[in-house]
Image (tube, rainbow, N blue to C red):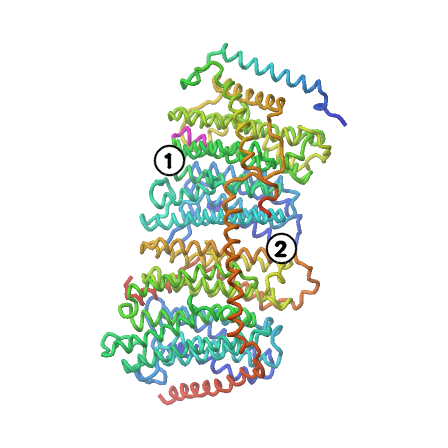
Amino acid sequence: MIENHMTIMLVVLPMLAAPLIALLPSKNLSWGLAILTATLQLYLAVNVLLDVQGGTAIHYELGGWAPPWGISYRLDSLNGLMALLVCLINFVCLLYAKASIEAEIPGRKLGLFYATWQLVVTGLLGIVLTGDIFNLFVFLEISSLSTYALIGMGRQRQALMAAFQYLLSGTLGASFFLIGVGLCYAATGTLNMQDLASQIGQSDQPMTLYSGFAFLFTGLLLKAAIYPLHAWLPNVYQFSPQAVSALLSATSTKVALYVVVRCLLDVFGVEFSLSRLFADLLLLAGSLAILFGSLRAIQQTDLKRLLAYSSIAQLGYSVVGLGLLTVTGLSGALVHLFNHGITKAALFMGAGMLALGPGTTLLTRLAGGTHRPWLLLLFLTGGLSLIGFPGTVGFISKWMLALAAIEQGHWWLLVVILLGSLLAILYVWKFIETLYFVPQNPPETSTGPVPGRGMWLACGLLCLAIVYFGLDTRFTLGVAMDAARQLLGVHP
Amino acid sequence: MSGFFDKANHIKWILRSFYGLCVLLLVLDFLLHRHHYLQIEKIPAFYPLFGFVACVTLVVVAKWMRRLLKRDEDYYDG
Amino acid sequence: MMAEYPPFLNFYLAALFYLLLSPLFGPRLRFLLPLVPLLSLGQLIILSPDASWSWQLASLSMEWLRVDKLSLLFGYLFHLAAFIGFVYALHVKDTLQQVSALLYAGSALGAVFSGDLLSLFLFWEMMAVSSSGLVFARQTQTARGAGIRYLIVQVLSGVLLLSGALVQFQQTGTLRFDAMQADGIAGGLILFAFGIKCAFPLLHNWLVDAYPESTASGTLFLSAFTTKVAVYALARGFAGTELLVYIGAIMTCFPIFYAVIENDLRRVLAYSLINQLGFMVCGVGLGTALALNGAVAHAFADVIFKGLLFMSMGAVLHRVGHTLGSDLGGLHKTMPKSTLLCIIGAGSISAFPLFSGFVTKSMIMSAMIEAGHDWLWLALLFASAGVFHHAGIKIPFFAFFAHDRGLRPKEAPVHMLFAMSMSAFLCLLIGMFPQLLYRLLPWQMNYWPYDLTHTLTQLQLLFFSALAFVWLNKQGIYPPELRSVNLDSDWLYRKYLPNMARWLWSVREFTQPGIARVQSVILRPFSHQSGLTAFDTSQLLLKLLLGLAILIGIGLLSSDLFN
């Protein structure tokens, strides 16, 4: 019984914690409760993932109402991995947030900040775990709405503007998704994912279903910032508070992409949703994302914006893996979601630490950071992972994707993947060079607030994770392979 | 301060002994029987000739190349 | 057994400790560095011949320790080079350089003991990254530029290697690194990757671009490892590939022309490094036991004598601040020991009998004749004469003799002299007792370099090359040393492509104002927000969401309670 409840507790814990955190009188207490919740969640996430390892799934019926009428939660390798990613990043970002956020946000707002943060996490985990497509929409809105609020708390004036833009685009995406859900409901009469999946082939209104599918899919792509629909992302990442950038970059788009995978392969099924043409379109979009994102990243003069464009490129890798529709490709795509998540979070945290003093992440203002050599290690580890250097997580995903591309005989794709790595060297070099090899001009006398112990700890943990999961892939890649096999219906 | 190599007659002495060694090596080519692996080696004094001609060719061609390839020192910085 | 782990770990751990301990002990720690290769060499010597060590990554097995005579030879060589290098670098207090050098030497060792292509790729890339640290360490604008170009080319080579490995894995299901065919896609990609690191013609520019921009000791390390790992990889993977004989012959010949007109003496040495690599590539291409032995033995000797020459020029750089031939001369008066040591290096590279170059290069020359490549043999002979001309005479002559420019620097520091003396000693030792080196060679052969014909003809060749130098100088034909840049294949990516990019950019700039105007019109309504603060928004949201959360929470709990 307890095991079954663990799934739902993952979602409910932060939801219950949120109001409490908002009500607590001191910022330290608020943070303490937040980190306590995060720790519990991380523990739960690891446990449920261990339970589903090897291809079993946990079902949970909310309120005891059996699907297709009640809302059900279903946990398998795929969302187990995503839940772990969200919980892990949430935990690490909270560790980091304490010192970082106090430097950015006035004390009286801190309780609200942590409360909103919990709601973001509730939303993200809800999306990941739910087995009901309308329920998914609800969680999508919960996370989006609270995310707008978090972004708006950014220190720079443009933060509000960025939040507003994200609100517009996010709402647009969510509306499309909702319309899609509505149409699917009209065609099949069900909202439960598994039930929907079984009815896809038998529906007497295929056109409705198709339009539903189209709306749903478009909305999701916007949410996931897949190449042509990526425009909202750079502003959001650039102007958010540091810890929020780290959280969002590692989770929000990844979760949206998870929904894409789930809907395409599980709900609508490969035969329905992925004609060869459509799969090729995904490959094309992914490749363009890799090239475009990397090239734009090279041009940036702001560290966080550079990282944001690199995120667009890195998401492209996952899209490419999805478009390949093989176990190798898909597991590469899934493991890349996780791997890139921890990499990018680490880099945004590093950017946040540099920004503590000057209050900006403009590269010219950050030049000459040699007084913090440990940060160089962080940027190097993260940067090498973006490039796909062996010994880091980035290598694992790119190796799988490259292997998948060759398996299918897509030579051009191999070229794109490797070219992406070369371009990554350029933008990674760009920030390493400015940070550590360009003399400071003029030399900064006061360095402002010093990074707190929590910030160092968080960065250290992520760096270790980048290297550890780059060397020992049994866990991450194993789960991703399980998930890919399940999704594609291949038996080992 | 003037060193050993600054005095003209020292240089002259060094060069003379160098020329002497060259002549000696040339003479040895005719006195000693060296092993032939290839036809071309049978040419009398093949190695001395080759060494001299090769180096002169090298320098002449390099000088000509310089005319084509030489640019200002800050060519790539501009 | 305790000692059965890959030797690169010694260096990587040393690098880690150096990084961790240097804040505590400061630059004093550098005095321990020469001990690292010494201790590691000890481990290598007691390593049992059938030791192996592998690591499971995903479904792939990475073999990090494969011991045979070929890898052992390079293993000994790299330890020796690292030891000499760290002694020479004892004055360096820069943590970046020391750590880079440790990682770089370790990666080179990792590469030669790698049993599969993936591990090779790993160390290949580690070499690229760690060695670029040595270029950047010079801390000048030029060095930064050269460093980034160097890094890109090196990583490109790694990427090609990775692609080749991927294709091979796909086709054969194994990543083992053994003899390969150059005509498949996999083999072709891998050969191309090796070719970049081995400075094949037109792929060679990273070398002459970056090596002379590094620091005195940095260049020493650079010259020892990267290209020699490439020679090792070629010898293991592509022995007997005929194409390599032709490539090698071109490599021996074209750089010497550049070397004659180049002004920076360390760049001259870089060109001559390519020339020496050409001999090794020829040997690998021939593929007979004698030729392969010649190739690896020449690699061994080259690391030492080229290192010695780079060290002597490094000493000049250290004392004078530059190595421009046009501004040097007469240094023998105050740096007599460096001069002598430099001349020993010059004698070795020119392959004078009794010096190390002679006993190794003549193996390749003999193998060339045995294989019937008469014309290419002539090309190699031409190159041999040319080497003496530009490296054997030009380097010591323009730096230490020629016109006295009135420079009176101090003699090189003691540790530098000591390192150079060790190299010089080795040059002479190998030259006089070649069986010491021959015994280590991986393939069976029966060869003795000192017969009458060899010795006589080599002396004739060299003396008359020198005569040509004297004559050309007396006639005033010899090209003077001039401050200049000579165009090479890097013109493509240093001039042509940047110009193209600039042109494309200017087109974009031209269209930019119109786009910007449209954007500003669309976005104007949002650019002045009023009354909407983040605080308000979050409170509003919080009220809504609190309600939601409480409702869902109650619903959930009650359903559980009543079940």
Q: Check residue C294 for magenta coloring.
A: yes
Q: What span is in magenta?
A: C288-296
Q: Which mark is residue A438?
A: 2
To which chain does the residue with label 2 belong? A
Q: Which mark is residue C422?
A: none
Q: C200 above or below C159?
A: above
Distance between the Cα atoms at labels 1 and 2? 46 Å
Query: Picture coordinates of residue C78 (x, y %)?
Result: 52, 39
Residue C98 in view (yes/no): no
Residue C58 vs residue C55, the one in the foreground? C58
Q: Nearer the viewer, mark 1 or mark 2?
A: 2
Q: Check residue C202 for magenta coloring.
A: no
Query: Picture coordinates of residue B74 (x, y %)?
Result: 61, 44
Q: Residues within 10 Å of mark 2 (few under 14, many from 20)?
A: some
Return the residue at label 1. Answer: C241
Residue depicted at x 65% and y 34%: C326
Residue depicted at x 41% and y 19%: B37
To which chain does the residue with label 1 belong? C
- At label 2, which amino acid type do we have? Val
